[in-house]
Amino acid sequence: MKSLTNLSQRTWWIVGGAFVVLAALLPVLNISIPGVLPGATYTPGTLQLLALALLFASLALSYHLLFGTAGMLSFGHALYFALGAYGLGIVLQQTELTLIPALGLTLAIVIAAAYLLGSLSLRVTGISFAMVTLAFAQAGNVLVRRNPSITGGEEGLRLDTEHIPEFFIGVLNTRNLYWLALALLVVVFIIVAWFENSRAGHAVTATRENELRVRVLGLRPFGVKLMAFVIASVLASLVGMVHLLLQSGTTPRATSADFTLTILVIVVLGGVGSRWGAIVGGIVYTLLDQRLTALAGSEAIADLPAVLRIPLSEPLFILGTLFILVVLFLPGGIAGATRRLGTGTRATPVARKRLEEAE
Amino acid sequence: MSTIILLLITGLGLGALYFLVASGLSLIYGLMGVLNFAHGSFLTLGAFAGWELARRMGGESWGTLIASLLLGMVVGAVVAAATEFLLIRRLYNRHIEQVLVTVGLALATVALFEGIWGTDAIYVTAPPWLSETTEIFGALVPNDRFLLIGAAVLVLLGIVAFLRYTRFGLVIRAGVENRSMVTALGIDVRKAFTVVFAIGGAAAGLGGVLASHYFGYVSPQLGGSLLIFAFIVTVIGGLGSLAGAAIASVVVAILQQFANYYLGGTGDLMVVLLLAVVLLVRPTGILGKKA
């Protein structure tokens, strides 16, 4: 049995490697998938969308570390994404720093903020933790909206390109940003996998399953939980920074409660507790969101009677409903469903257990 | 002096709104351990129902106001009970999944409201008396504040009386204390769940109609923005404690009003700071049980 799981794990790494190689080649290939992608894979528009999908996959992975591994149901993860995006944007605008030092400065700010807010929020557990993290994220939203002179307010913050290397600017260089997003996904994946297999990762998993037992063993769960929280936050902020470069700016939506919940939706859609589930969830969600938005504006929808037209023209309504159905009938998400198809066993109890341990 | 009185009464009015949302959250959490993210949607739907009614009946009369308040309550109660019956109950004892379902419902319903009523704020009409002011010790207090405070006090008394003097109330109180014991005694707690959801939904629906008069408009985001403060209130008051929610509602709202007036509009941030302080000093909240 053990060799079997080892084998399948090795297979997964090979499949993952092949995926990365294929993904890296996409900008030089001419592949069209009508209905899924807006154009051939070498066109900037498609690359922009694919880069966005990869970024959401990374973000979902960082949340997987928090929720799937450590069992912390945070409703404020978007705060760190926004901190990365707004932080880098503001540093570039207000100082004369070039990209790399600006990135370093922003990271230092994120680490300090995540350490402070994490140690505060971790004083409570379970549902209270979710509510408290949401409250802190909401404070970020207020700060962004109230200080338009620094953050651009409702208009959003435009990227100041003065100190950014040439090859990251302009539509023609979208493929460089795409490769950057892919590299980030690989880095995030390696860090998350490494953390899960480290001593701290094992301690955090044990805490998720039975905090009391970990305490009895003489370990302090608080420290490792805080560590997982800070690492997940830093990874999210990195995604935010690349997102700022890709979109040439950022908007207050990044700080909204909706966005925070979106990350949770992605992870649950992909399958809680599964690394590649998070990645697939991020990619599927982004493509689905884009397709549904296109669908909402299409003529086929506009001609329908109001009862059908109104719900179908709201992408979030469809995604929210889909999410409810997944939670009700497919608790393992996409990953669980595939596993069930592949092995013929029911993955549901495992996923259910993982969800309930999160309390 | 008159400014302080105005701020205090306005704070009480806002606190009343927070309490109307938080009371339902707190009851539901206390009995079932479910954090209901869709609670804001019950509120928004109640507000829209009240507005639609007022639009058809002409919003200037008292009869319309009372009818819209009642309709808001009924809509909130029905939708909440249906949510419990159709979605929450299927996931019996799976608390995280119950929360996730309400998250999905909140996202979907807000999008649906935007589709139906548009994203812009819709202004409401009310009896002229509500927009007039009454002088109390030199402070000109808008009359709608009194309506809010009165409604919240009635709801608080009503819920307390219900919990104390009815059989359902007894089952609910016992269920909050020890659910497995109540089930073991052969009492069907599930019926109590639906009732609690309906009561919470009614309070939220009422809060929605009142909120539309307090802020002067209805919008799909109305419930969500109030819900976050209601969350903060329930954490500060102690999860599952009705009295704690009542105290925290007033404290939070008054702090918010004073900070907005004297500290340059920093009310929202002050509330989050208060939350941080409470977490540091007393993580279980004012009246929360020891973990």
Image: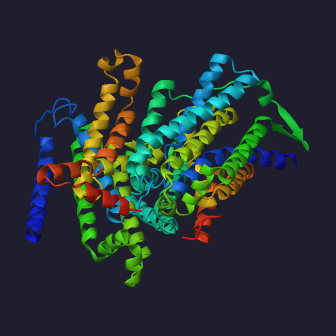
Q: Residue at x 47, y 61 (%)?
A: B184
- Across and down, in percent, residue B15 comes to 70, 48
The one of A18 and A44 positioned closer to us in this rendering: A18
**With respect to residue B242, does A222 lie above or below?**
below
Q: Relative to B201, is B236 above or below?
A: below
Q: Residue at x 42, y 70 (%)?
A: A226
Question: In the depicted view, which residue is nearer to us: A246 or B2?
Answer: B2
Image spot of residue A309 (x, y percent) = 38, 21
Q: How many marks?
A: 0
Quadrant the N terminus of chain A occupies:
bottom left
Q: Residue furthest front?
A: B186
**Up-down: is B260 above or below B140?**
below
Task: Residue B89 in the image: state x and y as whole percent.
Answer: 42, 47
Q: Residue lying farthest right?
A: B137
Instruction: Say left or right for A97 vs B262.
Output: left
Rendered image quadrant of residue B176: bottom right
Picture quarter with the C terminus of chain A: bottom left
Give the image quarter of residue B131: top right
Q: Residue at x 16, y 37 (%)?
A: A42
- Residue A105 in view (yes/no): yes
Q: Would residue B224 be visible to someone looking at this image?
A: no
- Vertical relation: A120 (above or below) A53: below
Q: Residue placed at 43% from the left, 46% from the top?
A: B88
Observer-nearest of B11 and B244: B244
x, y percent for residue B141: 82, 39
Left or right? Give the position of B153 relative to B197.
right
Compared across the picture, whether A6 is left or right of B62 comes to left
* Residue closest to the eye, A65 or A325: A325
Coloring applied to the structure = rainbow
